[in-house]
Image (cartoon, rainbow, N blue to C red):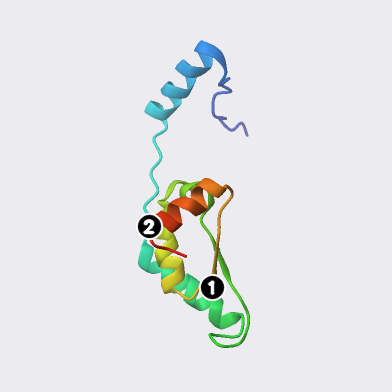
Amino acid sequence: MTLNAAPQWRFSGEQGKANYERALREYPAQAIVDLAALRDNMRHLVEVCGGPGSGTAVMGVVKADAYGHGLIPSALAALAGGATWLGTAQAREALLLRKAGIG
């Protein structure tokens, strides 16, 4: 049995840019983030780790714009679910959270 594999495209230089744009057109992807589900999942994680007041800290990681899903909304959902810490990859992201009144 032979499986059709995705084309092997290079993504560097001018040809890479053209291939990247073609890939976006031909293989569109969309992620829809349910912030209520994010909040509820965090709440469940907090419960599994001992619950609020147990002394266990749980960190919601929102680096890279929450993996492209929105830094501020994702951070607020994680905190609403009981996250005690927020993790970012860069100081700039932490400063954006501060500027939004978070932390």
Seen in the image, is 19 located left or right of residue 70? right
Q: Is 102 located above or below residue 47 in the figure?
A: above
Q: Residue at x 53, y 51 (%)?
A: 63
Q: Residue at x 42, y 22 (%)?
A: 22
Which of the two discs, 2 and 1, sits closer to the camera? 2
Q: Residue at x 36, y 52 (%)?
A: 32
Q: Secondary structure at mark 1?
A: loop
Asked if residue 57 can be seen in this view, the reply is yes
In this figure, which residue is indicated by the disc labeled 1?
84
Q: Which mark is residue 10?
A: none
Q: Is 68 located above or below residue 72 in the figure?
A: above
Front position in the image: 42 or 4: 42
Front position in the image: 58 or 103: 103
* Mark 2 residue type: Ala
Q: Residue at x 54, y 29 (%)?
A: 6
* Mark 1 residue type: Thr
Q: Is 41 located above or below residue 49 in the figure?
A: above
Tell me where residue 8 appears, x and y as whole percent.
58, 23
- How far is the residue under mark 2 from the one under mark 1? 17 Å
Q: Which of the 4 image quarters holds residue 24?
A: top left
Q: Which mark is residue 100?
A: 2
Front position in the image: 51 or 72: 72
